[in-house]
Image (cartoon, rainbow, N blue to C red):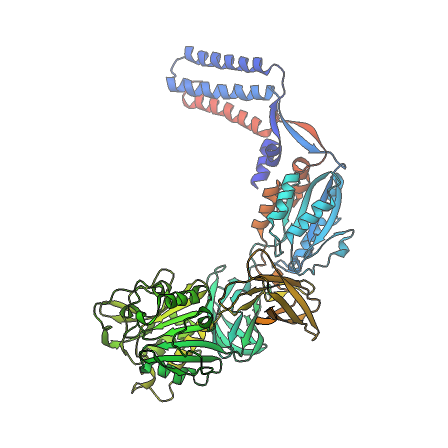
Amino acid sequence: MLENLAEFLFKYRPVLFQEGEVHLAAPAWVWILGTGLVLSVLTAGTYRMARGRSSRRDRIVLTALRSGILGLLLFAILKPTLVLSRVIPERNFVGILVDDSRSMRIDDGSGIARADVALAQVGLEEGSLRAALDERFGVRVFRFSDVVQRIDSLSELGFSGRRTDLAAALDFAREELAGVPLSGLVLLSDGANNGDRPLQDALLPLKAAGVPVFTVGIGEESLPTDIQVSRVETPREVLRGTSVVVDVVVTHSGYTGRHVPLIVEDDGQVVSTQDVELGRSGEPTTVRVHFQAAERGPRTFRFRVPVQDDERVAENNAQDALVQVQDATRDILFFEGVPRPELTFVDRYALQGDANIRGARVTRTADAKYLRQNVRDSVELQGGFPKAREVLFDYDAIVLGTAEASEFTSDQLQMVADFVSERGGGLLVAGGKRSLAEGGFVGTPLEDVLPVELEEPVGSEPTLIGDLAVRPTRAGAAHPITQIVPEGQDVTAAWESLPTLTSYNPVRNVKPGATALLTAPVPDGDQVVLAFHRYGRGKALVFTPQDSWQWQMGAEVPVDDLRFETFWRQLLRWLVDGVPERVEGRLPSDRVEPGRSVLVQAVVSDSGFVEMNGAEVTAQVTTPSGEERSAVLDWTVERDGLYAVDLPTDEPGLYRIALEARRDDSVLGQDTVYVRAEESQAEFFDSGMKASVLQRVAQETGGRFYTPETVSRLAEDLQYTGGGVTQIEEEDLWDMPVLFLALLLLIGAEWGFRRVRELA
């Protein structure tokens, strides 16, 4: 509307003024201008002499109005012209790129698919964009999605591409038309861009070559009714039987306040269902779901919201995640400075029957005397706490009970810190009379690792109270460690009904970046009961009570109550979750398009978990059909210990990739990763028209952005803003309607002012 008004007033569209320059074409314009100044002075003098009943202000206003009238007339006499560089007709070429991906099949609500809108714009009917361009340019048409091709007929468009790669499309068209005078490129798309390369890589060469891109946005920026499972964050691997907590992000438009179920399926079997109340349109809703990984092997978990009756897009209502459920054994080292019931009950109730956790326990019974339990052989932990780095690093986690700092050498304390930060292991420090600050750990390397702030103890004994009521924090209520009752039951209520504890190490504050999961009110504030943080590659936790066994043995606790063992089992499983092995396989994604290669990486470390080069790393690949292939991973040179190879996926389905690293005929370690080759649904996520992406493409290359309502101006704009072979044109401006209207306005204003002031 505003652009049409501007064109009516100034004779030409604003884009022409932006691209051109205004010149005064009349000869001897300086003399004419001087004459105008003289006339203005004489006008002012005339009003000055004919004072009559006029005041000084009246004469100033009348002089200004008369000068404006004379100025407009002089401007017209000077013959203002707009100098433009115009593309010579039929001497230049234009490339049209049409989005051929599946998202162009979406109906935004008008009953017409985006593909049909695009075809109407590039079709051959009278008045179309294609017809207008054909009159002025040589036209070349390309289709693009995950591949880019030049086409001769619109019938070659199938709108079945699985991805949209804007960078590849722009590069291909620029290179194909590099040998002809190119005025610009016209891009018709909904703006989806899920290619592998950054878009900026394609825009810089176009800008350098002076090739503008004129983008046409197809579709609505926001679908009127749509629900989307936008993001799912799952671990790559978990132990069998672990309680998995997953954050699922759901977005929508048009369903504010509606309740919908979020369903979690394990290879088609429902394992969890949760009611979700949708917030305001466009705002993401984060849903935390809990379920157990019961079946071993690679499992495909689907997170979906049922398609609503009036929903526009069904393909974005679900997300799949591949999780490797391992039936492996993780080793935890328990070390106690004195015998006590706390870890005894943990071992008896939480670890007994858990085939995936081996708790090697060593307890000091006297000076240089140790009781060893659940060890592999007669030499494991024979001398107490390990003194060698490679021995300690052979475990996945450490649990330190009531053992004072003097029990360890400075090298051992540093080893514990390195175990967490470099090896990536888990550390849990449990409360006790000789633990934390009361154990003299202030100022030691262990203090740096802990997630809480230690304060010098007032006395030799930790504070004793008779009523420590443990409650989960807001973050703790949703954490997998604290889920001590089956899904659907109130977690907070379950904690509130546990017996109170009687003894703890006083800790009031967590460090910046740490998270308190459990707390308890005490007379001088809140006691930190359980807290954790990430430290280097690993994680560290502190559990301050000394007698959590009362949750199992309290008189009011039923015999069949499983909250104590559930809490400790989940705590220990989370402690070893994600702890790396000496060979750690990595994939950029658990999914790849069939026919495309997948980058497989392996990080190889020695027994001290120092990343090492010079290893022989191989991959044994099992395809979906059962065929086995071998590949060698090469050292990347970019980083120590990192090896990589590109593996093809020539058939859809699940690929198993078994990695093994060797050196000098000895096996350093093994790992197994999985990847699915299947068609991506990325085209249907965030499926509104991406105006910001298309505007950026146009702006950074010197083009313009259009919609189907404004695209009729594109062909004319391209004549004046495009490159190629051009000629200079001059367009008159003296007859612009705005000059005539301004002249009438000034004359009317002068006459009206004189009438009002009775000066006529």
Image position, residue 286 (x, y; %):
46, 65
Residue sitting nearer the eye, 34 or 464: 464
- Residue under the point 65% across and 68% down: 677
Residue 611 position within the rendered picture, expressed as x and y whole percent measured from the top left? 53, 62
> In the current view of this chain or complex, which residue is farthest to the left?
459
- Residue 707 visible? The answer is no
Tell me the quadrant of the picture where the C terminus can be found: top left
In the image, is residue 152 above or below residue 288?
above
Q: Position of 587 compared to 427: left or right? A: right
120 up-or-down from 272: above or below? above
Image coords of residue 517 (percent x, y): 37, 69
Q: Is residue 181 visible?
A: yes
Name the residue furthest bottom. Answer: 559
Quarter of image, res 721: top right
Residue 233: x and y in percent read 51, 66
Left or right, 6 with respect to 170, comes to left
Q: Nearer the viewer, residue 92 or 729?
A: 92
Furthest toward the top, the residue is: 49
The quadrant of the image that shows the N terminus is top right
Q: Is residue 476 above or below residue 497?
A: above
Residue extending furthest toward the right: 152
Front residue (pair 43, 353): 353
Which residue appears at 40% of the width and 21% of the height? 757
Left or right placement of residue 742 versus residue 597 in this view: left
- Count of numbered labels shown in the rendering: 0
Going 51% across and 74% down the picture, which residue do you hit?
Answer: 238
